[in-house]
Image (spheres, helix red, strand yellow):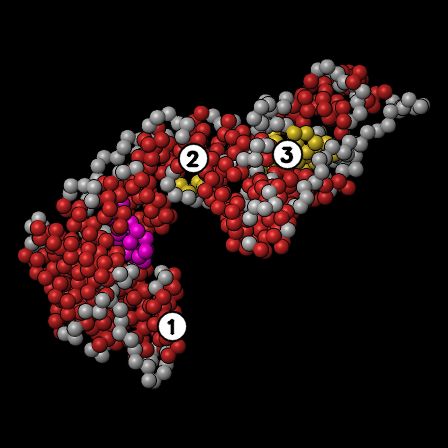
């Protein structure tokens, strides 16, 4: 415990560690010179992009406190270019480390060898530092101590490539604040971040411009410029993955007669097989297989299933149903796959794989036990169907519901309690829902296919997804033809007809809506007869025949009144009021509006209420009561905005501009027409946008004749 005792213990430790300083200065002709190792492999040439990542590494080196060792962990998927980035940065900064640079491949992910034992790496470093074999202690801990002693007063860089985990790295960290350490790994190495203050640099794909630059640098600008479309397709197919770009350019350089277009077609058709050139270190499938083999059984299964999930990304709830795991277990598995750099999560927690990684994952799904793949797909289809049904009920609670079968065991659908939650979910999942319907169709799950078409209708109407509605309705109709269900045939023909009418394919719309009406009449289905008349009314109005539209609307109203169905009656009265107003019978239209508005408010039919308010605005405007027209239109806009019905809201905004202009309120007219123009453009409604553009151009001109407002109404 005395001071001399502490000094003796320190001397004893240095003796055991074979501290070279104890030997004193070497003299004479046999003196061994100080070795300055230069172990860095050659820098990558050419090197494109990664300026942001290089800047982050620079900042870590320059901004770290003087008393702390700089450790940077570069993480990313296999083939992302981690080693290239590390070497590029290291060679740029060799002057900062005049005492040498050490490098070792730790073989964290290899097809034929186990990860390197850290003790082996330490022994290699001691050899590189010039330690004579006879002076290297036998104990691994003593060797580590000697390694750190040798680096204690030296300014050196240690590059640890391809580490498997933090436990493999920690024994190789110098103890000196004058040293810096670069680590590359497919794992995120959280232990280094929390325990050693490492700076995390996540490597993602190259941008399209950077990927194009890679092609130009390696193949020559003239070669790429000669086939610009093919080069752009290669960039897209490689998805910014540096290894994929390297393999592709290697194919071109070793096969001089190969056209870029032919290679793009080969890659598009064969996929990963084209990116396997027989060299394990330069083969994308091989590189991905090393990451896959390092996964736990549960992680590997989840990885395979995520590769076949419908859509480009997936949320936690859908992933839980896909895997059949609980939310907590699913979250744990996804975090493990993210740490392995096989997928990424955005700020909303949505999971996405690189396209080429996803292809590989889908290939591994073929190795799953029989039935496991189909069961997982059935669960995720049921998740999307039942959640979409919940969202549809929130958006339009008065629309007659369809019965669903009990979801497959292991499925946990979400409950969407209100309009805001439903719209948010549909907005996030719309593309995945389209993919889910395709998955159901390819597996012959006909009931799910038409039910998804039904569940998407209200959302697609409100958001103006007309073309997508044609696609989903067509799939629903085709699926229904495999079922012995007349009511379903009637419904799917009506959905198809209305979808065609929305995109202006009126002959097709007439055909399907008349088929739906005939089916309803043949089966004495009075309720669907009235609904089909209402759909026909809407279609004929879009075709410009208001007389036929009013006739069908009136017939629908008569049937619903006879059936004593107040909700359906209110909806039919709303469109009857609109077509009556367009016919110029403003007094009768007003009476329909008053009755219909009371019915909608009594039963909480907010979309019907908004439509009737729009009709009232039209009537007031065309009878010279412009202030009252503005109040009615504003109320309709407010309701449609709250409902998320931006399609109808755009029409309201266009319409309310007319009474503003008539009152000389040109500034306000310009505001509402500008907002309508932006919505029309977002919805791809080019003709509507052009009309409003003309209104804006003519605003304030005395000779301007305000255009007639468009139809806006609630449909079912």
Measuring 15% from the left and 54% from the top, which residue is drawn there? 515
**Circle 2: element type:** helix
Mark 2–mark 3 contact, CB under 8 Å?
no
Q: CA distance from mark 1 to mark 3?
A: 57 Å
Q: Residues within 10 Å of mark 1 (few under 14, many from 20)?
A: some
Q: Return the residue at label 1.
A: 693
**Circle 1: element type:** helix
In the picture as drawn, the residue positioned furthest to the front comes out as 257
Queried whether the magenta region covers residue 219, the answer comes back as no
Q: Return the residue at label 3.
A: 183
Residue 530 in percent (x, y) is at 12, 56
The magenta span reads 452-472
Marking on residue 362: 2
The numbered mark, 2 or 1, whose residue comes first in the sequence reads 2
Residue 4 in percent (x, y) is at 80, 17
* Viewer-nearest residue: 527 or 567: 527
Measuring 55% from the left and 54% from the top, which residue is drawn there? 227
* Viewer-nearest residue: 701 or 266: 266
Q: Foreground mark, 2 or 1?
A: 2
Specify the quadrant that holds the C terminus.
Answer: bottom left
Residue 401 in percent (x, y) is at 19, 46
The numbered mark, 1 or 3, whose residue comes first in the sequence reads 3
Specify the quadrant that holds the N terminus.
Answer: top right
Measuring 21% from the left and 44% from the top, which residue is drawn there? 480
Residue 445 higher or lower than 676, as above or below: above
The numbered mark, 2 or 3, whose residue comes first in the sequence reads 3
Residue 508 in percent (x, y) is at 23, 58
Residue 691 visible within the image: yes
Marking on residue 379: none
Quarter-of-image position of residue 23? top right
């Amino acid at each position: 415990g005395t001071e001399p005792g502490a000094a003796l213990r320190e001397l004893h430790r240095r003796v055991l560690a074979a501290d070279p300083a104890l030997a004193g200065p070497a003299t004479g002709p046999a003196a061994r010179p100080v070795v300055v190792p230069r172990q860095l492999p050659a820098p990558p040439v050419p090197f494109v992009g990664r300026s942001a990542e290089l800047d982050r590494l620079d900042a870590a080196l320059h901004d770290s406190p003087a008393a702390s060792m700089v450790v940077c962990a570069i993480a990313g998927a296999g083939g992302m270019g981690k080693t290239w980035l590390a070497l590029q940065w290291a060679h740029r900064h060799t002057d900062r480390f005049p005492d040498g640079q050490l490098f070792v491949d730790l073989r964290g992910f290899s097809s034929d060898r186990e990860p390197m034992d850290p003790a082996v790496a330490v022994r290699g470093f001691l050899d590189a530092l010039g330690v004579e074999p006879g002076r290297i202690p036998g104990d691994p801990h003593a060797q580590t101590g000697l390694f750190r002693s040798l680096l204690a007063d030296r300014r050196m860089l240690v590059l640890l490539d391809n580490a498997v985990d933090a436990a493999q790295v920690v024994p190789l960290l110098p103890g000196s604040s004058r040293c810096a350490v670069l680590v590359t790994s497919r794992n995120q190495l959280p232990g280094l971040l929390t325990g050693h203050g490492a700076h995390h640099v996540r490597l993602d794909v190259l941008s399209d411009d950077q990927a194009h630059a890679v092609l130009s640098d390696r193949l020559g600008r003239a070669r790429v410029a000669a086939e610009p479309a093919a080069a752009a397709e290669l960039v897209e197919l490689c998805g910014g993955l540096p290894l994929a770009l390297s393999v592709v350019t290697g194919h071109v350089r070793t096969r001089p007669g190969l056209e870029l277009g032919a290679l793009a077609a080969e890659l598009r058709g064969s996929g990963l097989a084209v990116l396997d050139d027989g060299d394990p270190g330069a083969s994308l499938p091989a590189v991905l297989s090393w990451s896959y083999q390092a996964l736990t059984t549960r992680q590997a299964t989840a990885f395979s299933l995520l590769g076949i999930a419908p859509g480009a990304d997936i949320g936690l709830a859908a992933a839980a149903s896909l895997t059949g795991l609980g939310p907590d277990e699913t979250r744990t598995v996804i975090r493990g796959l993210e740490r392995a750099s096989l997928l990424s999560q955005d700020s909303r927690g949505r999971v996405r794989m690189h396209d080429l990684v996803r292809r590989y994952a889908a290939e591994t799904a073929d190795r799953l036990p029989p039935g496991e793949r189909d069961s997982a797909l059935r669960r995720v289809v049921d998740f999307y169907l039942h959640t979409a049904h919940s969202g549809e009920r929130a958006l339009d609670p008065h629309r007659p519901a369809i019965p669903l079968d009990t979801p497959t065991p292991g499925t946990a659908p979400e409950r969407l309690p209100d309009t805001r939650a439903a719209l948010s979910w549909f907005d996030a999942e719309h593309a995945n829902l389209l993919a889910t319907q395709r998955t159901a169709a390819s597996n012959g799950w006909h009931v799910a296919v038409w039910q998804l078409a039904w569940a998407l209708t209200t959302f697609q109407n409100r958001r103006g997804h007309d073309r997508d509605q044609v696609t989903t309705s067509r799939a629903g109709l085709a699926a229904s033809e495999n079922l012995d269900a007349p009511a379903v045939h009637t419904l799917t023909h009506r959905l198809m007809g209305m979808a065609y009418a929305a995109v202006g394919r009126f002959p097709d719309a007439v055909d399907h809506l008349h088929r739906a009406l005939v089916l309803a009449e043949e089966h004495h289905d009075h309720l669907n007869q009235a609904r089909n008349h209402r759909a026909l009314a809407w279609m004929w109005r879009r075709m410009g025949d208001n007389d036929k539209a009013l006739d069908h609307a009136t017939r629908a109203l008569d049937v619903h009144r006879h059936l004593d169905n107040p909700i359906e009656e209110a909806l039919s009265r709303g469109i009857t009021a609109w077509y009556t107003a367009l016919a110029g019978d403003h007094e009768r239209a007003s009476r329909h509006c008053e009755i219909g508005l009371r019915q909608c408010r009594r039963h909480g039919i907010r979309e019907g209420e908004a439509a009737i308010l729009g009709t009232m605005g039209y009537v007031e405007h065309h009878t010279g009561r412009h202030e009252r027209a503005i109040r009615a239109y504003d109320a309709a806009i407010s309701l449609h905005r709250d409902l998320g019905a931006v399609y109808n809201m755009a029409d309201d905004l266009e319409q309310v501009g007319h009474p503003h202009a008539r009152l000389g309120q040109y500034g306000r007219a310009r505001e509402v027409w500008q907002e309508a123009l932006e919505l029309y453009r977002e919805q791809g409604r080019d003709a509507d946008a052009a009309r409003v553009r003309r209104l804006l151009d003519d605003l304030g001109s005395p000779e301007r004749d305000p255009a007639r407002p468009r139809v806006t109404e609630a449909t079912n």
